[in-house]
Amino acid sequence: MRQLLGEGMAPGTNDKQPADAQDTPAGDADERVTALRRFAAAGRNWRRARLAGSALLMAVALTGGAIAFGASRDSGATPVAASSAVSPALLASGSLDASIASLQAHLRTQPKDSDSWATLGLAYVEQARTKGDPSRYPQADKALERALRITPGNDQALAGQAALAAARHQFADALTYADRALKQNPYNAGALSSRIDALVELGRYADAAAAADLADQRKPGVPVFTRYAYVRELRGDVKTARRVLQQALSTATSKGDIAYVSAQLGLLAWNQGDYRSALDYYGRALTADENYLPALEGRARAQAASGDRADAIKGMELVVSRYPLPQPLVELGELYEDRGAAGDKEKAANQYALVEAWIALARANGVNADLDTALAAADHGDKDEALKAARAEWARRHTVHTADALAWALHVNGHDEEALTYARQATATGYRNASFSYHLGMIELADGERTAGRAALTKALALNPGFSPLGARAARKALEASK
């Protein structure tokens, strides 16, 4: 998934003692994961309304230390999508947290340094996104607001607000902030990158391609190259996407850049069913940074597709133990279901419950999680809620991913005729995605279009036969049944 997936602090009112830049007590990711698991276990017995309310209380509990002391306690940082507005070099293992600690120390002595507040805000956005802790977003918001109070029109702070809005899935706002930043500084790299992201996530692919071309002219580099490649991939031009990413990798020098681009190449290869290349690229990423989350997750996914289920489960368990984000949680649950050993059904259910808990927490911290809800709930949760969320997301933006999510939510709720329109729209750009073809084929079969449905399912399995352990099995079963 490219979204992006993809996501509290009380600001000091006295510039001499910034509450945003205090030291943080010791702790690690296990505390956050344990809290999330406890919350999920309790939430399974409550009504959804109470679950959402409890998410807010959980957010307070998780961020109590951050409110009082700052947020530099977690170790390691890895981007989960190509939407980072911070240089990937900053995201190498440990460097993001070290940078935050350094900025906090600096701001305790120089509280009117607006550029440092802006940089801190951006770093908090990354910390929130990459660690699966959306409770960091309010902290980022306060730091960015502080930068703008000190220096109205600060282009770095405006670019930070664009990145924050994108991380919260508020893409129209992200575009507005990016344009405001570029009005102040047409060469602001973060704003140029966030502008591409916003246009992609609003489904304005032609505009996104033009924005990528402009960014390449003004600020060529790894962040722009990876976005340029993704825009091409969405339009079916895998060859160009691969060439651009390989070029980016050949110019990468920092460990963060090498890990970042290698993981993107791994994902591109996996999407095309080239698991050997995917594993090679993920291995290269992990050589640069052994804790790089997208590479750890991607390697587990490629191992599963290659038939190495034991290592895949072990790897995905490691990922979710550190960063309980929706996509790896769902993937681990499906790996358990596919294995089918004693206790695996309950293990899978626990992963899906954690997704619900994460979504509730995300919403409590201002993140629009409707796409996450639709994708997870359609197969592993409340189907009515999946459709409600998918319709809400489609009302906000028309992308291939929202079209696919709405199509599938309609299908699982029995509305196949309506679903078919959206499933075809999801595949209309030429984007080579086996899950999209699988969804289209299943919907076409359900709607009585046997020939088209078989063709779409055959295409999905030919492109990426291990796209999903459960989905691939269902596709093969449907093909056999429709002979």
Image (cartoon, rainbow, N blue to C red):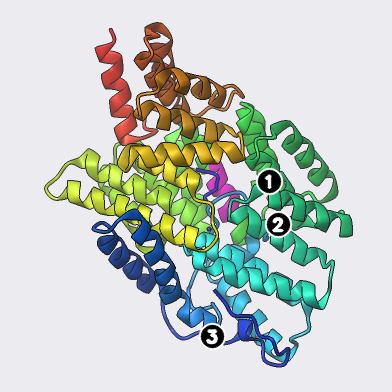
The residue to which callout 2 is attached is 162
Q: Look at the image and give the residue range highlighted in magenta.
A: 258-265
Residue 259 located within the stretch drawn in magenta: yes
Dot 1 or dot 3: first in sequence order is 3
| Residue nearest the viewer, comparing 411 with 434 | 411
In the displayed structure, 263 sits above or below 305; it is below
Dot 3 or dot 2: first in sequence order is 3
Dot 3 surroundings within 10 Å: few (below 14), some, or many (20 or more)? Answer: many
The residue to which callout 1 is attached is 198
User: From the viewer's perspective, is 386 left or right of 199?
Assistant: left
Q: Quadrant of residue 109?
A: bottom right
Percent of width and height locating residue 426? 54, 27
Quadrant location of the C terminus in the rendered image: top left
The residue to which callout 3 is attached is 69
Disc ID at residue 224: none
Most frequent secondary structure within the magenta stretch: helix
